[in-house]
């Protein structure tokens, strides 16, 4: 095990670049009543510097999120009567991943750089089936959070079929993956994260006090953040940030490390303004720019 302390640097942008140089990020998130999770993940991705961010969400939620996310391209997915993503939505993703037709306008994600999936998706059986079916289609790194993780609890072999995976569980989600209890996870967080990363052959971001990032060999223990960040939506912000940095060509480990650090720093800045007791997820998201500005490696 190697402890990593150095945070990867964020470099100033060259003047001769365009949005395509900073990556395409796809977020698959949301369901009826959980559009906020999709908003937080997608907005945090674009705010963290991704050149283009796309959000795929249930068709009933797409108009709502399209109006709110003015800098994000939204796409509707087939849904069930309860307003969650249907298993039929796999066909929608397949169509999105095909190159655009020169004859007609068509949204294409054929060269997507990172995909974040899970925030607010629900545990509906059809949505879980969609997640398990769609994940192996991506050739780019995938950041899997929340209900994305829940869908894989008894199907972790899918992770082995993918190019690169970053899992972002909290203690309870980690416990489901390792078939244990959240109490045991919290009692020995480092060993639990290492075990999961080695067993599943992926990067694990075990969220919580001193969030741990590990690939099974290298370990980063975060030093930023505060108890006020224990609030609904905080993890959705982190998912969008990690996906954004992966799309910007940071390695999956570095992207996770950088996102975790800046996420905590944004929370610390926000807590000074709003107090830990009053802190909410949009405060963390809104202070991402200030966290980047204060980041000592931003030169």
Image (cartoon, rainbow, N blue to C red):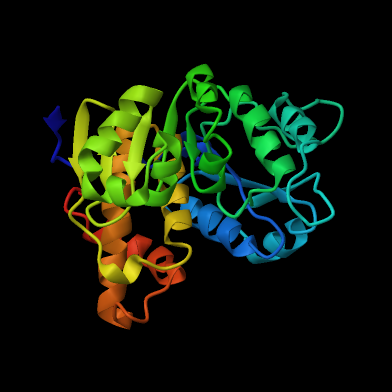
Left of 6 or right of it: where is 263?
right
Give the number of callouts. 0
Q: Position of residue 130 (x, y in %)?
A: 70, 36
Q: Position of residue 100 (x, y in %)?
A: 75, 28
Which of the two residues, 156 or 243, is positioned nearer the viewer here? Answer: 156
The quarter of the rendered structure image containing the N terminus is top left
- Residue 159 visible in the displayed image: yes
Q: Position of residue 269 (x, y in %)?
A: 26, 70
Q: Residue at x 49, y 25 (%)?
A: 159
Left of 6 or right of it: where is 53?
right
Q: Position of residue 86 (x, y in %)?
A: 77, 42
Which of the two residues, 163 or 46, is positioned nearer the viewer here? Answer: 163
Which picture quadrant has residue 294? bottom left
Q: Residue at x 72, y 24 (%)?
A: 99
The correct choice, above or below, for 274 with respect to 41 in the image is: below
Which picture quadrant has residue 276? bottom left
The correct choice, above or below, for 275 with respect to 225 in the image is: below
- The single residue placed furthest to the top in the displayed view is 161
Left of 135 or right of it: where is 189?
left
Q: Residue at x 39, y 32 (%)?
A: 249
Q: Residue at x 77, y 56 (%)?
A: 83
The correct choice, above or below, for 3 with respect to 69 in the image is: above
Which picture quadrant has residue 12? top left
- Residue 11 visible in the displayed image: no
């Amino acid at each position: 095990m190697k402890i990593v302390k150095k945070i990867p640097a964020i470099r100033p942008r060259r003047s001769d670049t365009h949005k395509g140089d900073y990556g395409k990020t796809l977020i698959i998130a949301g369901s009826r009543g959980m559009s906020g999770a999709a908003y937080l993940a997608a907005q945090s991705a674009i705010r963290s510097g991704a050149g283009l961010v796309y959000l795929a969400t249930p068709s009933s939620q797409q108009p709502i999120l399209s109006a709110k996310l003015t800098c994000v391209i939204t796409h509707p997915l087939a849904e069930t009567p309860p307003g969650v993503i249907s298993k039929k939505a796999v066909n929608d993703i397949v169509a999105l991943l095909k190159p655009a037709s020169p004859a007609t306008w068509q949204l294409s994600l054929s060269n997507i750089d990172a995909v974040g999936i899970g925030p607010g998706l629900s545990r509906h059986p059809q949505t879980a089936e969609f997640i398990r079916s769609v994940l192996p289609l991506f050739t780019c790194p995938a950041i899997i959070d929340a209900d994305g993780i829940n869908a894989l609890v008894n199907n972790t072999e899918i992770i082995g079929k993918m190019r690169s995976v970053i899992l972002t569980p909290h203690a309870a989600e980690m416990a489901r993956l390792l078939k244990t209890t959240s109490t045991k996870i919290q009692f020995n967080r480092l060993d639990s994260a290492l075990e999961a990363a080695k067993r599943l052959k992926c990067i694990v971001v075990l969220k919580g006090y001193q969030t741990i990032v590990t690939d099974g060999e290298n370990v980063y223990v975060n030093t930023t953040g505060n108890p006020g960040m224990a609030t609904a939506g905080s993890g959705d912000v982190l998912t969008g940030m990690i996906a954004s940095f992966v799309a910007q060509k940071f390695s999956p480990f570095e992207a996770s490390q950088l996102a975790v650090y800046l996420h905590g720093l944004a929370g610390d800045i926000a807590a000074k303004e709003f107090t830990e007791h009053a802190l909410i997820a949009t405060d963390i998201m809104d202070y991402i720019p200030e966290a980047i500005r204060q980041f000592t490696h931003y030169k």
